[in-house]
Image (cartoon, rainbow, N blue to C red):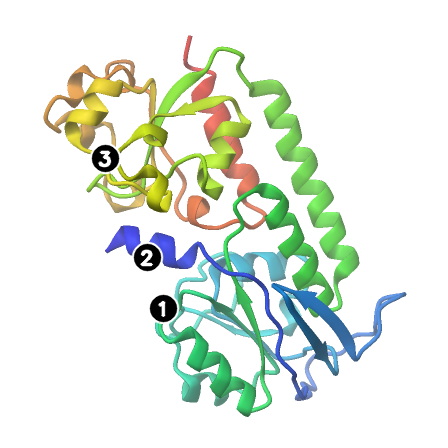
Amino acid sequence: MFKRRVLSLATAIPVFLLVTSISNPAFSATLSKGEAFPLTLQSGGVVTVIPQMPKRIISLSPTATEILFAENAGAQVIAVDSLSNYPTNAPITKLSAFSPNVEAIASKRPDLVILSADATNSVSIQKSLRLLKIAVLVEKAPTQISGAYSEFITIGKATNHVNDAKLLVSRVKNSINSIIEKSRKKNLVTFFHELDNTLYSATSSTFIGHVYSSLGLKNIADRAQGADASGYPQLSQEYLVTTNPQIIFLSDAQYGENLQTVSARPGWAQISAVMTSNVVLLPADITSRWGPRLVDFYQSISDAMAKVA
């Protein structure tokens, strides 16, 4: 279940639908220099017109929520889904990111909704909201960091915060490039990234895998059975022991996995990463999101690499 949730939230290409804006007396803003509404955007192969600047945004994407607030569009956000736990001042609600409810969404009178492409009945949800004259931004996970930066800009344009978006891209890009420059190793270090305790992982063809490869790490999942089919193969205990990774990254640490639990798995006590205690508990959520906290993900990897001789 955890693996499915991680993968479902880690997908989406921006698509905008025609919207009639609903005013929000509590929020006022002027258009940035050079920006004007109605605004025509092309994203995900779709050309869309947004008549007015969105003033009542609902985010059903934890990644989008983080981006919105990092770009100073938080005052325009009236509600976020139950999983959007960052930043702490986001107006979290019971709205579901996995199974969106049109009636519950519409009752809040949004003029822009951000939705995951992999949400249950995503296409029909989009159509229903469009009939109600509510714009929908459908997001899909990028496969490389450049795609994340593009999404920063897209959200910035849609909310009239393009200058803030450009500053965010610059800040995140500079921080990540600095980490890569200081940390990248010439001699490849092998690693295993654990999505859940049933040993699902991510290959280098995925966004998560790209982060690791940019730092010069060698992904043991790349040659696993089924790796080419989805990018998220399920590894076996025997395969993990045989490939003997030097670092293990646990993105399921928030669910109780740690050095002690993996040490108790059959044969794992002999794995290099376990023997040297190079088992990294990744901060909650950052590996399934591609927002501003990507820097934290890179830094966690860099810190682990520094411990490997």
> Residue 98 — which label?
1
Q: Are marks 1 and 2 in contact (CB under 8 Å)?
A: yes
Specify the amino acid type for callout 1: Phe
Distance of label 3 from label 2 (alpha carbons) = 18 Å
In the rendered view of the protein, which quadrant contains the N terminus? bottom left
Q: Position of residue 110 (x, y in %)?
A: 57, 83
Residue that mark 2 sits on: 5
Choose the circle earlier in sequence order: 3 or 2: 2
Q: Nearer the viewer, residue 33 or 239?
A: 239
User: How many other residues sit within 10 Å of disc 1, few (<14), some (14-19) or many (≥20)?
Assistant: many
SS of the residue under disc 2? helix
- Type of amino acid at the residue the image marks with label 3: Leu
Name the quarter where the C terminus is drawn. top left
Mark number for residue 235?
A: 3
Of marks 1 and 2, which one's residue comes earlier in the chain? Answer: 2
Q: Is residue 69 above or below residue 193?
A: below
